[in-house]
Image (spheres, rainbow, N blue to C red):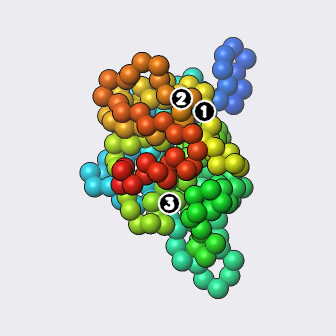
């Protein structure tokens, strides 16, 4: 898979007779041929020094390894028609569901706004671990207040507003710490048993907890 104007190629194994499926390989096209990208997490994370509203980094699990990707959201005042919900890299129906949960349990409405969510780099996220990141990016855009650049977020969000744990939580945190992230907002059940060097882990149970700790992060 590749974008038209991109040098990078994504090789995805959807079937593997001898191992795990959904493996993901990142390669770059050079003058000498195609070569492996040694640190793919750095590829999909913006290197901006100044934080901007509507952007947050999440840790997804692709195949057998964690991968850091940037999730961006833009909430814009809609026109006369019904509000648009556009998701690139995420399931569109999932975005509609998350916006309803955000309104019901966080008190933030997007009924009069168009909402666009994009996963940077052309990565497609099939797991619900990016739910919390998509919500925080949208909240950041609605309030026009950026989230810190050293923050990584992951967690599944349920209809009751609970933040559910995801698989391979500690592996995701260690990958984020290795790349240089210093803070993480995660489900309480994904809080590591032993501290990770250089990483402050903030554990939450529900969206009410997220809204409570959010002012201290912004």
Sequence-first disc among 1 and 3: 3
Q: Please provide percent x and percent y for residue 187.
A: 54, 36
Sequence-first disc among 2 and 3: 3
SS for dot 1? loop
Q: Quadrant of the N terminus?
A: top right
Judged left or right of residue 199, residue 158 is right
SS for dot 3? helix
Residue found at x 38% / y 43%: 151
Residue found at x 34% / y 42%: 150
Q: Please provide percent x and percent y for residue 153.
A: 48, 42
Q: Quadrant of the C terminus?
A: bottom left
Residue of label 2: 190
Image disc number at residue 139: 3
Q: Toward which corner of the image does residue 182 lie, by quadrant?
A: top left
- Answer whether labels 2 and 1 touch (C-beta < 8 Å): yes
Above or below, 61 against 133 in this view is above
Q: Residues within 10 Å of mark 3 (few under 14, many from 20)?
A: many
Image disc number at residue 21: none
Q: Nearer the viewer, residue 25 or 51?
A: 51
Residue found at x 42% / y 18%: 194
Residue of label 1: 165
């Amino acid at each position: 898979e590749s974008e038209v104007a991109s040098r990078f190629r994504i090789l995805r194994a959807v079937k593997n007779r001898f191992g795990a499926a959904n493996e993901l390989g990142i390669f770059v096209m050079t003058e000498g041929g195609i070569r492996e990208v040694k640190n793919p997490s750095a590829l999909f994370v913006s290197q901006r020094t100044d934080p901007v509203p509507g952007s947050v980094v999440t840790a997804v699990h692709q195949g057998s390894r964690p991968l850091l990707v940037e999730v961006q959201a833009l909430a814009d005042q809609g026109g006369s028609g019904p509000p648009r919900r556009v998701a690139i890299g995420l399931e569109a129906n999932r975005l509609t569901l998350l916006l309803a949960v955000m309104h019901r349990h966080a008190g933030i409405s997007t009924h009069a706004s168009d909402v666009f969510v994009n996963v940077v780099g052309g990565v497609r996220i099939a797991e619900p671990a990016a739910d919390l990141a998509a919500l925080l990016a949208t909240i950041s855009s609605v309030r026009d207040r950026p989230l810190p650049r050293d923050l990584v977020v992951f967690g599944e969000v349920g209809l009751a507003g609970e933040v559910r744990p995801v698989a391979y939580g500690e592996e995701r945190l260690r990958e984020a710490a290795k790349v240089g992230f210093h803070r993480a907002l995660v489900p309480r059940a994904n809080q590591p048993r032993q501290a990770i060097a250089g990483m402050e882990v903030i554990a939450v149970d529900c969206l009410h907890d997220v809204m409570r700790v959010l002012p201290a992060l912004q």
